[in-house]
């Protein structure tokens, strides 16, 4: 199914990312309390299926996985097999990181980055073996300005060949120079055609620096997907307790919703944000996240929330120190 911009007035603008539930360890704050004590493959598969069931029932029609999210693709594929009614779900995945933790939370390295054509060939074959024809969007994972994925013509030709088969080609970005990486990617063409049909980037109340570049991407017809809209849990009720998030708590109290709903609604208020990913690890978190679809913040509230923004360098330095749990 082609990746298309969802109707702006529906919950379909929200997607579900599987980073937090496809493997036993991740960096979201409080995640150690969210997942079951039993983090065996079978237990996490069942947990992911419950989350996917709730997402579908709640109107979510985009799901985002990656090769490095442990067994996220496999969990998603087995859910799709048992849910033939979910043919209208658009499936995105990513390549460029290899999962190396061997299903351990205390691994020295959880993933290894490589944007070479050889890794693309291997991981595309792996994704195809799991998801088959259900793959709608394939993204380069975590592109930074120095990534060879932005300059490798052999890789670009391979990606264009996949696009010719009907799969949308996208990229996700990370780091304080996201805007520059996005703008560079938007200029890449193969055979006169733009290579990338979608852009996924970190954007939230604490890290809004990619906003102008994402607006430019949207204006040129690309689908914009926002990840980490909750700042890896920093904007959740249980973590937004300091003076730096006082305004977030005040507005949440005023409109009688949770902090996460306000944080996600603030992102969804951007006219260029086509899909906003929930990174929920539990059904309860997902339900709270999706309540943002019904929340409309006024201009004054959005302006007040702007004080949460941090310098991009500081934000990414903080993120790099988050522990896997």
Image (cartoon, helix red, strand yellow):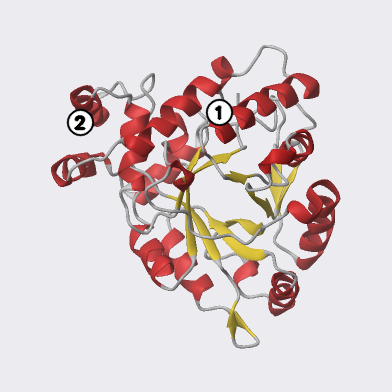
**Residue 323 tag number:** 1
Q: Position of residue 182 (x, y in %)?
A: 48, 66
Crowd class of label 1 (few under 14; some 14 to 19; many from 20; radius 10 Å): few
Return the residue nearer the eye: 19 or 77.
Answer: 77
Return the residue nearer the eye: 244 or 164.
Answer: 164
Residue 220 placement: quadrant: bottom left
Q: Position of residue 269 (x, y in %)?
A: 30, 48
**Residue appearing at x 33%, y 24% in the figure:** 258
In the rendered image, which quarter contains the C terminus? Answer: top right
Q: From the viewer's perspective, is residue 295 above or below residue 65?
A: above
**Residue 247 tag number:** 2
Return the residue nearer the eye: 134 or 215.
Answer: 134
**Residue appearing at x 18%, y 25% in the figure:** 254
Name the mark nearer the viewer: 2 or 1.
2
**Residue appearing at x 69%, y 25% in the figure:** 105
- Horizontal arrangement in the rendering, residue 29 relative to residue 87 (left or right): left
Label 1 residue SS: loop
Q: Position of residue 207 (x, y in %)?
A: 36, 47
Nearest to N terminus: mark 2 or mark 1: 2
Query: Looking at this rendering, what residue extends furthest in the bottom direction?
Result: 192
**Residue appearing at x 35%, y 31% in the figure:** 261
Q: Looking at the image, can residue 11 be seen?
A: yes
Residue 189 placement: quadrant: bottom right
């Amino acid at each position: 199914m082609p990746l298309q911009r969802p109707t702006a007035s529906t919950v379909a603008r929200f997607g579900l990312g599987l980073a937090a539930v496809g493997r036993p360890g991740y960096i979201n704050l409080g995640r150690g309390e969210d997942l079951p004590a039993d983090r065996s493959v079978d237990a996490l598969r069942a947990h992911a299926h419950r989350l996917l069931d709730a997402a579908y029932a709640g109107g979510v029609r985009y799901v985002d996985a990656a090769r490095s999210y442990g067994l996220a693709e496999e969990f998603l594929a087995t859910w799709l097999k048992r849910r033939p009614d979910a043919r209208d779900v658009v499936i995105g995945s990513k390549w460029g990181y290899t999962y190396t933790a061997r299903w351990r939370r205390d691994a020295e390295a959880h993933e290894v980055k490589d944007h070479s054509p050889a890794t693309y060939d291997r991981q595309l074959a792996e994704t195809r073996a799991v998801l088959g024809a259900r793959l709608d969007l394939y993204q380069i994972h975590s592109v930074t300005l120095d990534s060879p994925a932005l300059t490798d013509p052999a890789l670009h030709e391979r990606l264009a060949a996949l696009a010719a088969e009907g799969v949308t080609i996208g990229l996700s970005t990370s780091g304080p120079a996201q805007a520059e990486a996005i703008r560079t990617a938007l200029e890449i063409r193969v055979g006169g055609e733009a290579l990338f049909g979608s852009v996924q980037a970190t954007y939230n109340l604490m890290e809004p620096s990619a906003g102008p570049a994402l607006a430019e991407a949207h204006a040129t017809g690309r689908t914009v997907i926002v990840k980490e809209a909750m700042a890896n849990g920093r904007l959740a009720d249980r973590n937004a307790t300091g003076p730096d998030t006082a305004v977030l708590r005040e507005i949440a109290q005023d409109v009688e919703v949770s902090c996460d709903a306000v944080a996600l609604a603030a992102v969804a208020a951007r006219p260029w944000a086509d899909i906003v990913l929930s990174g929920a690890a539990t059904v309860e978190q997902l339900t709270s996240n999706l309540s943002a679809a019904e929340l409309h913040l006024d201009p004054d509230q959005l302006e007040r929330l702007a004080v949460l923004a941090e310098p991009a360098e500081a934000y990414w330095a903080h993120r790099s120190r988050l522990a896997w749990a």
